[in-house]
Image (cartoon, rainbow, N blue to C red):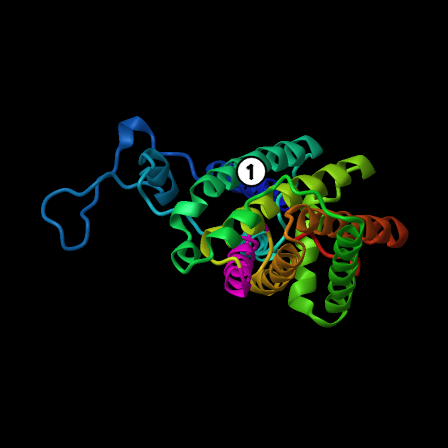
Amino acid sequence: MKGGSVVLQRAGAGLLAARHHRRQRVAAPPAAASGAKQKTKQPGGKGFGKLAGPAASIQEQQPADPGAAQPDAPPVVASTVAAAGTAESGSGVLPVVSKGQIIAVCTQVSVLVTVLAFGLRQVAPAIAPAVKDGQAAAVANLLQWAVLPSAGQVALAVGVAAGVTGARLALLAVWPDFRDASERSNQQVLAPLSAADVVLVGALPAVSEELLFRGALIPAVYPDWRGVVIAGLAFGVLHNSGGRNPAFAVWASVVGCAYGALFLATGTVACPVLAHSLSNIASAALWKSSTVGSGDGGSGGSSSSA
């Protein structure tokens, strides 16, 4: 609407200028008869000067200079344009995307991350510093992705997911930067999705990210707390995008360390995959339910996945 008002104001200014020009032409006195041309000397000049005549008539005969400076836009137009630019640059709102775009990007990125995870898993025994320190067996054990969790390990993963979700809700109430970053990301990613889409978008990144950061990166560095911290920090750094901010990156780093500790405690990457997936889905579902219940776009709901 702001762009439309600028166009209308410029068109009105042009019509007024044209109307004023026509009035000047009508009000100008008629030129002298051709047989009685009057000549006069210009002050300070030599010889005969130019033909005397009305100033308005002389101005009409002079062609307009296309390079001449144009008058400034009316103040109201300039202020409208400035206000529009300020609103667009300072709003902090992410661009609107469709459900198809979200699912397509989520799928493509998840496939790419999974490929990277398998590649790192293949070279981990050769590049891991822990192998040189005599921890080759520990590295090999963590690279066994096919190990299925026991019932107790599944319960532990569910508990970790519940703890992450509860901590997320608590931080949303007391950490404005974290809440703002979560809300921006949720509005862009979750708003167009249905319940089935939420499950898909919550699970795909969880599987691929856990395979890379926990299943491959931890064994590739150190199969202990050092690998947990390194993988957690890398996980947090890569979450400082998509409308998120350093506050969200700090949160993601802490959560990544929690998933890494779960990986070491159970010895199977299936547990952090399960915990991460459940946490993502629960957080997204809580945000969607708060959006429907409040009707205000989801303010105060749960945060985006990490």
Taking the image as shown, residue 129 lies to the left or right of residue 99, namely left
Q: Which residue is mark 1?
A: 114
- The answer to whether residue 7 shows anywhere in this view is yes
| Residue sitting farthest toward the top | 35
State the SS at label 1. helix
**Range covered by the magenta-colored residues:** 224-242
> In which quadrant will I find the N terminus?
top right
Q: Residues within 10 Å of mark 1 (few under 14, many from 20)?
A: many
Residue visible at 36% across and 42% down in the picture: 54
Residue visible at 50% across and 52% down in the picture: 137
| Residue 240 colored in magenta in the image | yes
Residue 204: give x, y in percent of width and height. Answer: 66, 39
Residue 299: give x, y in percent of width and height. Answer: 78, 58
- Between residue 258 and residue 34, name the one nearer to us: 258
Taking the image as shown, residue 62 lies to the left or right of residue 236, namely left
- Between residue 95 and residue 56, name the one nearer to us: 95
